[in-house]
Amino acid sequence: MRKSYKYRLYPNQQQKALIDKTLETCRWLYNYFLAERREKYEKEQKRVSYTYQQNSLPSLKETNPNLQGTYSQVLQDVAQRVKKAFRGFFLRLRNKTGKAGYPRFKSFGRYDSFTYSQNNNSYKLEQGKLRLSSISKVKIKLHRELEGEVKTCSIIVKNSKYYACFSSEVEPKLLPKTNKKVGIDLGLTSFLATSDKELKEAPKTYRKAEKRLAKAGRKVSRRVKKSKRRKKAVILLAKQHEKVSNQRKDLAHKLAKELVEKYDGIAYEKLAIKNMVKNKYLAKSINDAEVNAKNTSQICSECDKQKEQKLQLSQRKFTCSFCPYSDNRDINAARNILKRAEWVGSTLQGAVSMEAV
Ligand SMILES: [Zn+2]
C-alpha cells in the first residue's frame, strides 16, 4: 500500500527562487491547459485529452521559453492535474450533484506544489540532501526513516516553508498471533489502563499542553465580545486546541500499535472510544469488542459485587467491600471491561487504533 512521508526542506535563496519559479511556471501551464479544455468544451462540447496535452508539451516549449527550465516530468504532472480537475467536473455534471462549476483558474500564489511523477533519478536522496532535477541539491531534514519503494516526490510550499513529500509503496508488516486478549479503560488517573495492570501515562508535554488549552479557554471567556483582544485569544485557543488534539492522536496511535502487537483481542468501552479505525500499516486480524461501560468502576473485577458506597471521582483506588481485592480504579475498570467482552463481534482486518473522545 501507499504511504506518504513529509520532510522539511531548507533551500538556500537561490534554490527558493528556483522552486518559486517552477511553481509559477506550473501555474501558468495549468491555466493554459485549463483554458484549452474550456474553450473546446464551450465551442464544441468536446474534450481535450490528456495525451493530446502531454504530446503538445515539446512544441509549447518552443513557443514559450518560460517552460524550458522546468523538468518535463513536472510539466506532465500538471497535465495530469488538469485531467483530474476535469474528470471531477464531468462527474459532477453527469451525477448532477450540486453546481457542476468549471474547474477554476489558479491565481498568483495559489499553486503550491509540483510533482516528480516517476522515480527515474529525477530526484534522489544523497547525504542529507535531496537532489532535484533542474533545481540542484536541497538540504532536507529526514526526521524519520523513509521506508518502501518511493514512487513520486512532491515539493510543497506552505506559509513560506518548504517540504518534500514522498509517496512510497510499503509492504504491510505481518504481526504474529499472541493468543492474548486485553481490556482497556481510558482512565481518569492515567491516559489508559489495561486489564494486565499496566498504566499508560500521558507524557508531561501533553499534560502541559492540556493546561495551556484550559488557560486559553479561560482567556477567551474573560475578554469582551467582538473585541480585538478576544479575536486574538480565539486564534490562540484554536492553535492550542489543534496542538492538544494532534498530541492525543499521536499518543493514541502509539499505544494502539503497542496493544495490537501484544494482543489479538482488545475490549474497550463503548462510550470512551469514538472510533476504532483500521491502521492499514499493520496486518493482523484483531478481534474487538465494544463493552457497555456502565458501572465498570463500581464493580469489583474479582468477585463481581458492586460497592456499597459509590467510588467518588476523586478516589483513585478501588477497594472491595466484600473480598480482599484492591487496585487502581482504572485497572479494576479495565479488568471488568475484559470480562464483559463478547468476542463474537466484528473482526477487523488490520490493526486498530483508538481515538479518545
Ligand atoms: Zn471483591
Image (spheres, helix red, strand yellow):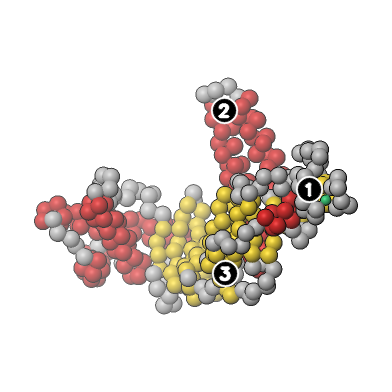
Residue mark closest to the camera, 1 vs 3: 1
User: 157 left or right of 336?
Assistant: left
Q: Is residue 191 visible?
A: no
The first of marks 3 and 2 along the sequence is 2
**Label 3 neighbourhood size at 10 Å, few (<14), some (14-19), many (20+)?**
some
Residue 135 in the image: x percent, y percent?
44, 67
The three-letter code of the residue at mark 3 reads Ser
In the rendered image, residue 56, in percent from the top left (x then y), is placed at: 22, 68
> Farthest bottom residue?
120
Estimate how packed mark 2 is, as few (under 14), some (14 to 19) or many (20 or more) residues with alpha carbons within 10 Å: some
Q: Earlier in the sequence, mark 1 or mark 2?
A: 2
Q: Is mark 1 within 8 Å of ligand 1?
A: yes
Secondary structure state at the residue bearing disc 2: helix
Give the residue drawn at x 65%, y 30%. 218
Residue corresponding to mark 3: 285
Q: Nearer the viewer, residue 326 or 59?
A: 326
Q: Amino acid at mark 1?
A: Lys
Q: Residues within 10 Å of mark 1 (few under 14, many from 20)?
A: some
Measure how far apart labels 1 and 3 are at the Cα level: 34 Å
Q: Nearer the viewer, mark 3 or mark 2?
A: 3
Residue on which the image places disc 1: 305
Marks 3/2: CA–CA distance: 49 Å
Query: Can residue 306 be seen in the rendering of this structure?
Result: yes
- Determine which residue is flagged by label 2: 230
Q: Quadrant of residue 352?
A: bottom right
Q: Give, as a three-letter code, the residue at label 2.
A: Arg
Pair 1/2: label in front: 1
Residue at 76 percent across and 47 percent down: it is 299
